[in-house]
Image: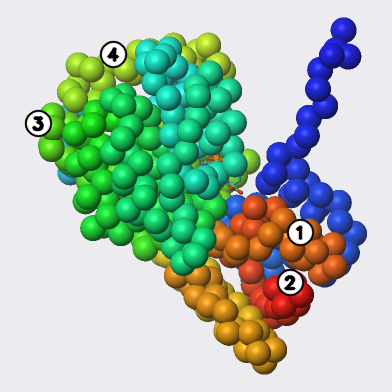
């Protein structure tokens, strides 16, 4: 019956992470999957989440189905975190926000909705982008193209090429953008570059699809939502830009397995938001009917309890600062080793790239050597998750990178 089915080749990130789990070497180091590990190399349980969970378990009771769109308190908490409670778009009720099964679920529900109601649109993603973006939108039936983004020569952004390409896109093209902490490059647009891009999006009548999976890991919780809020405020075309935002609490709450995400659709007015909400509810019903309760209620409780929200924000800020400090330590240790060998290449990208990821520029062969000979795991694209570094492994990573980089 199933003989004709092709064997699954595996996922470039998740399958590699599973291989790491099976690796028997005790000195193995996981810089592959986008997960934040603490100084002991373990997933943290945030104190604010632990406190919320204690309260929640005390009040635990019946477990009815959630509404298709998720719980009202969660949906409001998401809108306030992404857009700010005082934003005109929030206060005018023109954003349809739904709880989804992770940010992944938000992306897929939005993709299915767009395919149904904008069937002739194509999707354009950055070159490179998160490995799963292409798979998700192609899986929804879209043609997926790329726009220039990462500049290998500088380790930075080729913004002029990006802008020129987006200026050529036909109306209603769906443009997937990273709000902050670009995956896999760690390279983000400046506010000035967003200020040039957003009017082009408005004038061309494009449909931005913003993915924000790392809010708080770039410059800060509020700062990292700047592009989303600027998109919602733009009136270049005389009317608001309609756009999609898939968001995730997996990393910012360290709740990966609770699958806490959301999809927000910013519409021109409340009436159109109601129409979008209805068909998005139908899309969810056709996919998985309704979202789970527990994790989402932890997030809502933290975000809507002032003392817990302050505690969470402080913990997330500390995570961001810690990653930046470890990036500095790697940059120094690797730089010393390379210079000692007479190699003066510029490795500043380790400290200029932001969020969890750095695009090292290592070839797949070099990444394989790093894994096989040094037990250091990077994604084969050359992406390194800086959130896997800690004081106990950062020098070993610097030594391993230097050895591999100096060989070729
Ligand atoms: C940009 C982006 N968007 C969405 C997600 C999915 O989030 P979630 O809420 O867990 O469904 C991830 C996860 N990225 C890491 C893990 C993975 O690939 O699934 C990663 O890039 O390693 C992203 O990096």
Residue bearing the label numbered 4: 275
- Residue 167 in view here: yes
Ligand 1, by image quadrant, is: top right
Q: CA distance from mark 1 to mark 3?
A: 51 Å
Residue depth check, mark 2 versus mark 1: number of the one nearer the observer: 2
Above/below status of 373 relative to 308: below
Looking at the image, is mark 1 or mark 3 earlier in the sequence?
A: 3
Residue bearing the label numbered 2: 408
Looking at the image, is mark 4 or mark 3 earlier in the sequence?
A: 3
Looking at the image, is mark 4 or mark 1 earlier in the sequence?
A: 4
Q: Quadrant of residue 393?
A: bottom right
Above/below status of 163 relative to 25: above
Looking at the image, is mark 4 or mark 2 earlier in the sequence?
A: 4
Q: Quadrant of the C terminus?
A: bottom right
Q: CA distance from mark 4 to mark 3?
A: 22 Å
Discs 4, 1 touching: Cβ within 8 Å: no
Q: Quadrant of the N terminus?
A: top right
Image x and y of residue 34, in percent = 60, 52
Residue bearing the label numbered 1: 365
Discs 2, 1 touching: Cβ within 8 Å: yes
Residue depth check, mark 2 versus mark 3: number of the one nearer the observer: 2
Q: Please tell me which residue is depicted at 53% across the width and 36% down the height of the picture.
A: 133
Residue depth check, mark 1 versus mark 3: number of the one nearer the observer: 1
Q: Please tell me which residue is depicted at 28% across the width and 38% down the height of the picture.
A: 167
């Amino acid at each position: 019956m199933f003989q004709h089915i092709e064997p699954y080749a595996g996922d470039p990130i998740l399958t590699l992470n599973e291989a790491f789990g099976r690796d028997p070497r005790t000195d193995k180091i996981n810089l592959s999957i986008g997960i934040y590990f603490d100084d002991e190399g373990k997933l943290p349980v945030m104190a604010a989440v632990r406190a919320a969970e204690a309260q929640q378990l005390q009040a635990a009771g019946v477990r009815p189905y959630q509404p298709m769109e998720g719980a009202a308190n969660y949906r409001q908490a998401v809108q306030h975190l992404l857009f700010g409670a005082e934003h005109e778009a929030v206060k005018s009720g023109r954003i349809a926000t739904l709880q989804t099964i992770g940010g992944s679920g938000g992306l897929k529900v939005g993709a299915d909705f767009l395919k149904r109601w904008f069937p002739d649109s194509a999707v354009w993603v950055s070159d490179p982008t998160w490995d799963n973006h292409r798979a998700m939108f192609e899986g929804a039936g879209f043609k997926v193209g790329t726009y220039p983004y990462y500049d290998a020569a500088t380790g930075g952004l080729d913004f002029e090429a990006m802008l020129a390409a987006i200026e050529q896109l036909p109306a209603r093209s769906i443009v997937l953008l990273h709000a902050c902490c670009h995956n896999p490059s760690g390279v983000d647009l400046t506010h000035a570059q967003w200020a040039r891009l957003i009017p082009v999006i408005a004038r061309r009548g494009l449909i931005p699809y913003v993915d924000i999976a790392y809010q708080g890991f770039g410059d800060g919780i509020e700062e990292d939502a700047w592009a989303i809020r600027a998109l919602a405020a733009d009136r270049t075309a005389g009317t608001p830009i309609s756009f999609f935002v898939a968001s995730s609490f997996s990393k910012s709450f360290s709740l990966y397995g609770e699958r806490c995400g959301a999809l927000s659709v910013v519409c021109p007015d409340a009436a159109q938001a109601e129409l979008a909400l209805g068909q998005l509810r139908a899309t969810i019903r056709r996919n998985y009917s309704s979202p789970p309760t527990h994790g989402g209620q932890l997030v809502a409780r933290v975000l809507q309890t002032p003392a817990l929200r302050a505690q969470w924000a402080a913990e997330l800020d500390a995570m961001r600062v810690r990653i930046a400090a470890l990036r500095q330590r790697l940059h120094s240790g690797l730089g010393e080793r390379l210079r000692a060998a007479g190699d003066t290449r510029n490795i500043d990208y380790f400290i200029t790239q932001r969020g969890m990821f750095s695009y090292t520029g290592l070839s797949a062969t070099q990444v394989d050597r790093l894994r096989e000979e040094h037990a250091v795991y990077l994604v084969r694209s050359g992406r390194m998750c800086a959130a896997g570094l800690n004081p106990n492994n950062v020098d070993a990573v610097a030594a391993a990178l230097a050895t591999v980089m100096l060989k070729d």
